[in-house]
Amino acid sequence: MATRAAAATLTAAMSSLLRRSASLRPQGLRVPRRVPPRRFVRHIASSTNEEAAARAAAATADTGPPTIFDKIISKEIPSSVVYEDDKVLAFRDINPQAPVHVLVIPKVRDGLTGLSKAEPRHVEILGHLLYAAKVVAEKEGVANGYRVVINNGAEGCQSVYHLHLHVLGGRQMKWPAG
């Protein structure tokens, strides 16, 4: 038993030494990194940019010009449509966060710039958006596991003030989210 413990200690010490000193490593030997990959740093920077964009968008949420989603609905901006009916439009996100990342939006904003702006008159469209998310998940082949996300307000990192649902799937989702 003592021999195994000594061997484990020696292995850990050698691994640590090799990681710190490239000159002691034999050519071609790769040692696993214990430092988070650089994408972690990019994620922090990306997150900061998203937060700044959300704050900027919030400033003109109810009074601003047509949103990018309004322009997609009117076909001024092209999109990869996944599902469409008379009330909603679903299209692929241009910055996907999962193998399947589709946005579902109401075709008429009607003051529904975020979930916090919902009123009793919006009940039907809110239910229809969730139903459309289910249809999208089936069409995309992720009906057995997907996530539906609504970002609301600047602190929720909402960057487009036209209510929209994110349908995310195609990989194992983790919890807690965010």
Image (cartoon, helix red, strand yellow):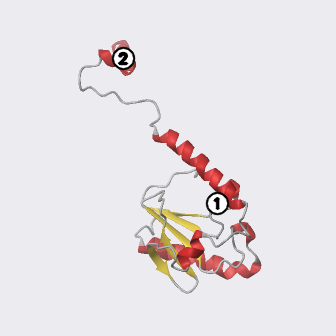
Where residue 127 appears, as percent x and y from the top left, is 63, 78
Would residue 130 be seen by someone viewing this image from the given angle? no
Q: Which residue is farthest bottom?
A: 86
Q: Which residue is farthest left?
A: 27
Residue type highlighted by circle 1: Gln
Q: In this view, does 155 lie above or below 40?
A: below
Where residue 64 appears, as percent x and y from the top left, is 70, 69
Q: In this view, does 178 lie to the left or right of 42?
A: right
Q: In this view, does 134 lie to the left or right of 171?
A: right
Where residue 134 appears, as percent x and y from the top left, is 51, 74
First along the sequence among labels 2 and 1: 2
The residue carrying mark 2 is 21
Residue type highlighted by circle 2: Ser
Q: Residue 158 carries which label?
A: 1
- Using a 10 Å C-alpha cutoff, classify the residue at mark 1 as few (fewer than 14 neighbours), some (14 to 19) or many (20 or more): many
Q: In this view, does 26 lie to the left or right of 171?
A: left
Where residue 53 appears, as percent x and y from the top left, is 63, 55
Mark 2–mark 1 CB contact (< 8 Å):
no
Q: In this view, does 70 lie above or below 59?
A: below
Quadrant occupied by the N terminus: top left
Q: In this view, does 9 lie above or below 62?
A: above
Q: Which mark is residue 59?
A: none
The residue shown at (66%, 82%) is: 124
- Quadrant of res 80: bottom left
Would residue 71 be seen by someone viewing this image from the given angle? yes
- Using a 10 Å C-alpha cutoff, classify the residue at mark 2 as few (fewer than 14 neighbours), some (14 to 19) or many (20 or more): few
The residue shown at (64%, 81%) is: 108
Instruction: Tell me the element at label 2.
Output: loop
| Pick the front one: 2 or 63 | 63
The residue shown at (31%, 16%) is: 23
User: Looking at the image, how many numbered discs can be counted on the residues?
Assistant: 2
